[in-house]
Amino acid sequence: MHVIKTVKAMQALSRTFRSSGRTIGFVPTMGSLHEGHMSLLRRSTEENDVTIVSIFINPTQFGPGEDFNRYPKDHKGDMEKISTLPVEAVFLPDVSEMYPKGFSTFIYVGGIGNILCGASRPDHFNGVATIVTKLFNSVAPDRAYFGQKDLQQAVVIKKLVQELNFDTEIVLCPIVRESDGLAMSSRNSYLSDEERKSAIILNKALQYGKALIMSGKEGDISSVKGKIAAFLASDPLVRIDYIELVHPESLEQVDTINGTVAICLAVNIGKTRLIDNTIINNG
Ligand code: AMP
């Protein structure tokens, strides 16, 4: 397995793969790998001749006061997990490699970056789109794998790829959950025992919302949102950031619960911000 630190070396290696006719699957991550990441890696190894994973905690997608400086790191554990799969290369650039002194060129994703998580994390999705562009230009993947856990991120990246003509297919992979339903996330490690117990409420609220919609008895969106809000508010540790019912491909608010709907949630529990979503096909 190659461990690559520079963009030039990554480009050279990926050129060798391509020139021998091999397809490249790519999984961008911020490390501290868990089963959610591993499911993306596994899928890539199944669908491509070569798989490349990147580990890079991207400073431009963190706002002031967010957790960039304390984001969990587990280099040894990550390398051990990656080595259990047929992964050809790990791209591990330093911040100075990706953002050398004087760096000033950013991708602007437009209004889609200001809704849902973007409303409380201004510039987050511009930072995500910028680093994904830089990673795609380093790896030149045929396919790149993203988790539905970060649905808005996947939609933003699909739009980026389409509008800026990247020759990369974006593959969306299902959310991997702990046995009690909590969506796996590197940030779950911030939770105290008590907070961890409360965190189960996100998935429960999604299941409750789904049952309301599928029951056929709920006529309007605001009633469903209100009931989900009341459900979440029953736990004193939970502070709601947003509850939205959107179309899973456009992220536009739906005005009827018939058809395909994504329920998207963000809450704060203590100092930890957690997100989750579920996609419902309701006829
Ligand atoms: P991160 O390291 O948090 O930037 O995540 C890297 C990739 O893994 C992103 O595409 C995430 O959506 C995906 N991912 C994170 N958690 C999960 C999960 N629980 N299930 C599926 N994919 C996930």
Image (spheres, rainbow, N blue to C red):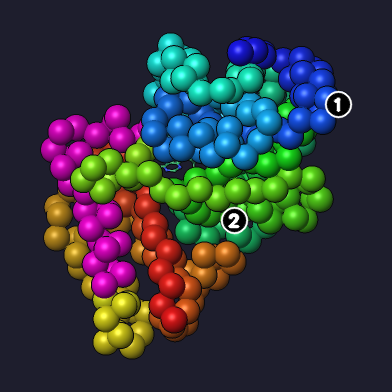
**In this rendering, does residue 244 appear at all?**
no
Residue 57 pos. (x, y %): 53, 26
Q: In this rendering, which labeled residue sits more in front, label 1 or label 2?
A: 1
Q: Quadrant of residue 18?
A: top right
Residue 27 pos. (x, y %): 58, 34
Determine the residue positioned at 15% across, 33% down. 193
Q: Is mark 1 on a helix, strand or loop?
A: helix
| Number of residues whose C-alpha sits closer than 10 Å to that of mark 2, classed few (under 14), some (14–19) or many (20 or more) | many
219 up-or-down from 222: above or below: below
Residue 23 pos. (x, y %): 74, 34
Type of amino acid at the residue the image marks with label 1: Ser
Question: Which residue bears the numbered disc 1?
Answer: 19
Q: If you read the primary sequence from the N terminus, does the residue marked by circle 1 or circle 2 appear first? A: 1
Determine the residue positioned at 35% across, 39% down. 184
- Is 67 one of the magenta-colored residues? no
Question: Which residue bears the numbered disc 2?
Answer: 155
